[in-house]
Each structure stands twice: as C-alpha cells, then as structure tokens.
Image (cartoon, coloured by chain):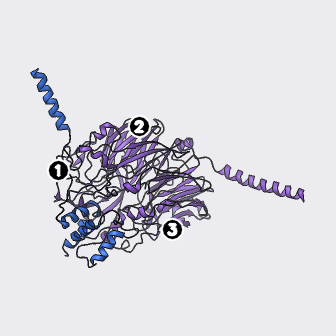
Chain colours: A purple, B blue
Amino acid sequence: MRVKSRLIAFSAALVAGTMLGSVASMAQAVDAKRLEMAGHDSKDWLTYHSSYMGYDYSGLDQINTKTVKNLEVAWMHFPGRTTRGLQSMPLAADGVVYYSSSFSRVFAIDGASGKVLWSYVPKLDEDLIARQTHSPYNRGIAIGDGHVYVGTVDGRLIAIDMKTGQPAWDTKLVDSQKLTVGFTGAPLFVRGKVIIGSQGGEWPVQGTIFGVDAATGKQIWSFSTTAGTEEAKKSWGNDTWRIGGGGGWMPGTYDAETNTVWWGTANPDPLYDWAGADIKTQGARPGDNLYTTSVLALDPDTGKLKFYHQELPHDNWDFDSALGEFMMLDRGGKKYMVHVNKSGFIFVYDRANAKVENVWPIVHNYNFVKNIDPKTGELIGRRDFVAGPQQEPLCPAIAGGVSWNSGSYSPKSGLWYKVGNEWCITLEVVKTTPITEPQVQLNIGANFKMAPPPSGPIYGHLDARDPITGKLKWEVKYNAPPTASVLSTAGNLVFLPDAAGIIHAYDAETGKELWSHNDGVGHNGGIISYMAHGKQYIAVETGFGGLVGDDYGSMFGEPWKSMPRDAGALVVFGLGSDKMATK
Amino acid sequence: MILFSRAAALALLLAAAALPARAETGAAAPSDPTKNGEILFATSCGWCHSDGGREAGKGPKLAGTTRDDAFIINRIKNGKPGAMPAWGKVFDDAQIENILHYIRSLPSK
C-alpha cells in the first residue's frame, strides 16, 4: 500500500513535470531582449504595433494572395459588457492570444482552439465611470517580464501574471475621482518599466506620462505634458499650464539603439481658442502651449525629456499628436521616425533628434492651415478663430484626418497602408470657463456638427503610399470612413476591417480585393496575425461605437442607426487544414 | 547711462511683449439663465449634442424636444449608461436648470 502510494505520487509528479516541461518548451519568456529583437519576421505580436519598429505587420505568409480565398472563422470569443465595442489591440506570444475589452477586462486564450486559459475582471469605480464621457473602453495591453499590463479608466495600472491571470500589483497613478481622466490607452513595456500616458486633452488637467517599475508597480517617474520643464510653463499665459490638458492617451514606441521612448501628446483645452490672430498673448491659453500636440523623446529610466518637436504649436483644432503610430524606417543611410498627426499630416523625423525631414498630407481636404513646410514643419497660413460662428467649415473634422487606429507598413512592399478621412465640421466658437470643481469636466469651447468637405460627400480612403515621400500607389474608397486598424502581411495581403462590419483582404501591390467576410457588426479596434501550433491566424476585434463612430447613425443611417453599441467579439480566422496546401 | 537705460527699457518692453496676457474665460452672466446654460452646454455638452443641440449627432437633437422638464432634468442628472454621463454630482440644480433653459430656447425647426 505504501509502495503503491509512492508510485502514484511519482507518476503524478512525472506527469506534472512533463506537462510543465511541455509548456516551458513552447513558451519563452517575453523579456526586454526578446522584445528588442522582435522584427518583422516574428510569429508573434508582442507589442501594440507588433514590435517596437511600429509596423503593425506580420511576417507570416501561409495566408497569402492564393490561399486567402479559403479563409474562414476558426473561433470567436465574446468578452461580454463590450460598451462601445472592442477597441484594443490583441497581443500574441507563443500561440497564446491576450486581449482587453471594455472595463479593462483581460483574457488569455489558446490561439488555436479559442479555449479560455484565464480571465481577469478588475473591480472598477462604477460610480465614476457613470460620470465619465469617454468610458469605459480600453485600447490595449502590454506584456513583459511575466506580466500583462492594463490601465483603467479610474486611474490605475494593473499587472497580471501571464500564466495564471492573478493580479501581481495594482497601482493608483491618477486621482480620477477628482480629475475625471484615467487610462484608456495601452501601456508600453520597456526594459523592466511600464510606461503609460493619461488622458488629458479637452479636460482641464495636467495630462501626465508615467514610468512604473514592472516588477513592483512602484511609480519611478512622471512627466507632465503641460509643465514638464520650465520652458513648457513659460509657454502658457497666466499659468494655464495648470489646467492645459495634454496627456498621451496612446502608446508610443521604443528606440533601443538610443534608449529613447517616443511618445505623442494630446491637445490643449479648450479645444477652440478665441484669441484670433493673437494666440501668443490673448484668449484662453496664450502661447505655444508646450508640450501639447508634440512628439516627445523621453529617457525610459528617468522620464527626462531628451528632445521634442511640437507638431502644432497652440493647437486650435483638436489635432493631437497622441496617436501612437511611430514607424522606424532606415533608407539611404538615414534613420527616420514617421509619425501620424490627427490632422492627417504625416511627419517624418530624423530619429536622432526629431528634426523634421518631411511633412506630407494623407487627406485632400484641409484648411486649418494652408500647408505645413515640409522642410521645417512650420505651419503656413494657420486658421485661428474669434468667438462666434465661423463662415467656412473647418477641415478636417474634429474626428481627424486620421483617427487613432493604426495603419500598417509592409517592409516587403515598401508601402504604408493607412486610412484617411475626408470630412469637416461647422464651428461656432464659444468663450467658456474651465470647470474643475467639484470634479473636472470637458472644456470644448464650441458648438459644431459634422459636415461634408468641399470636394463632395464625406468619405474615407485606404491609401498605399511611400511613408517617407507620401507618393500614392493605390487607393480604395469607402462611403463611411473605416475606423479600425489595418494589417499587412508577408502573404502580400492588406486586411481592412471596415465600419459597416466587412473585413476586406486586398492584394498589397494592387489594392485588388481578394476576399471579404461580414462580421455582422462594425469594427473599431485592432487586427493582428500570429502563429499557433504551426498555423497562421488573423484575429480581429469587432464592436462599434465611440467618439467617432457614435456619429455614424446620424451621418450615414443604416447599418449604424440600429447597430448595437455593446456587441463586440474577438473573431479569429484561419485556413482549413485541407486548404493550406494551396500555398 | 542713457544707452543703458534705453537698453533696459527695450529689454523690459520685449519681456513684457513676451509675457502672455491674462488668460480670458467666458464668465457667465448670473442673471441670464439661458446664457449661463449656453456656456455650460458649449463647455461640456456640445461634444455629443451637435451644433449646440440643434442637430442629431452622437446624441439626439434637443431643439424642439417633446420631453418634459422632469425627464430632461432626470436625464442630465443620471445620464444613460454607455451613452451619456451622469452630471448630477457635477452640476448643481441651478446649473442644470440653466441648461434646461438653454435647451428650451433652441428653435424647434
């Protein structure tokens, strides 16, 4: 009997050991080294933009121009309570998919079967959420050093054990109960630190970027985007930096070669100042309003500012630089950083110092400036306002010439695939007073409504362009601007999930549509590709709503008029096993 | 000395020119509830209620609404989960009354 017990115990240990060994052999640690080595040939999707290179590109090619016709739904996952749809970017490592949904719920799922490995549902301040304007969506997570990291709309950053789903630490960074803003965007893991930016923008707060120890959750540094230096404070009349807005609500990227984090910041408030031509000395926030609507280069260890470029001094149009799309490109011996401004202008920088190398527009309809000098980045013929109705609609609209979801750069085709929006707003500027008591509130400073551009009806377009020069190769138009991210792959495919619910696959070289599928509800989130058990998958988030999409019902009618705002799912596509041979 | 004084004066002038003027806000007229409501609306409500509530956008058109005062006040105070924030702990009763005054002042065309 005793011998038998020992035998059972030994057998159990052997089985457990074998299982653990099996898992360990499949999974490698996601650490700083792996993240920095990840390139465009990765089988995973380790950061928000696939890798620090910021391409939103997959090097997998089982699904390609020949096999894509056989793409079919492999599995789906419904996270529940998806208010305003899924808006995050899934991540994938070693065949496991990690993703977040509204209310900062996080899931780990077997990438091949769809089996839920664990789920984490944080307890949030629901009373606060009821008072927030932009809640409760979540736009993504980061992974590194054994944790999944997620921000919350009530001002916390949480680390979850990647294997068990148990919380490791939970750090309060922002007094959201007073300031209203919290975290909606994804964090960025960099060498043992987690970096995350708060909302700010139209709220009269000091939007802040934080650096947190990934192991302990202890805050290491913070950088105020309105008062990070004395130079910044001097660029706000009457100390309005105290309530200037800013923030950095989407993740940036990391240049390991120079140990530099690039992060984009949001706009100042009120959105529309009434100083007329006297923006330096009059109005609601006199001055350039540093470092709002800027790209910042920060030391990830200290949060110290290395260099910066303010894309729109005294941003008067809500055209953030907070869109986190940064692409590292090397060409002709030069090292570039390409960044997307919400105005629809694309800024090309020298990666060493943020010196402007080129600026080009992806949109056709703009009048907030006459142009931006491609050599210096200087705004030419900027359009500022005095209080009252504006004669001519403002273009692009407040929703942006581009929105916050990402484009995709294919190193195989050398093309960047990005959505541009052609729309405007009518505008009446109103002198407002910032509300900071008892709780901070939006400070817009205007009445507006969506309006068609001078060129005709509102529309959106997926462009295939050279990201440095802006030269157009092909374009696909949509009656309603797509609001989700774009994916390109080594299979010479470009996937675009559109706002009506159709996911399209195009030939990356020609723009010819090769495949489509109706997901039944609009797309407003991320799309990735990954490998699990030797097979390539495409994972796309569905569900609609938000500060752009909520206008679609009144602008375009059906299907958005009746589209639910709480029907998001993760939909995963793969090739049938008998159909992969057609590669 | 004169040169110094002139230089100093010029420096002061330049410094003064470089110093932004006092920031301006849209102080409301307490005696005009509709104007107060209009400013509050353009501060925080106009994001969703297009054209100052005159058109449907993210939120419904408010001009000419057939909802009664009690419904509108309740909706402002308690919001609508997933669609509209609750303002009851943010705005006091007088401010909410002002917003109601503004909504009622919108032409119902």
The disc placed on residue A80 is 3
Q: Position of residue A98 (x, y in %)?
A: 55, 57
Q: Within 10 angstroms of label 3, few (less than 14), some, or many (20 or more) residues?
A: some
Amino acid under disc 1: Gly
Q: Is residue A184 left or right of residue A19?
A: left
Amino acid under disc 3: Gly
Rounded to the nearest angstrom, the CA distance separating label 1 from label 2 is: 34 Å
The reply to whether discs 2 and 3 touch (Cβ–Cβ < 8 Å) is no
On whether disc 1 and disc 2 are found on a single subunit, the reply is: yes
Q: Is residue A31 above or below residue B66?
A: above
Chain letter of disc 2 in the image: A
SS for tag 2?
A: loop
Which residue does the numbered mark 2 point to in the structure image? A304
Q: Position of residue A522 (x, y in %)?
A: 42, 67
Q: Is residue B85 above or below residue A342?
A: below
Which residue does the numbered mark 1 point to in the structure image? A276
Chain letter of disc 3 in the image: A
Q: Within 10 angstroms of label 2, few (less than 14), some, or many (20 or more) residues?
A: some
Rounded to the nearest angstrom, the CA distance separating label 3 from label 1 is: 47 Å
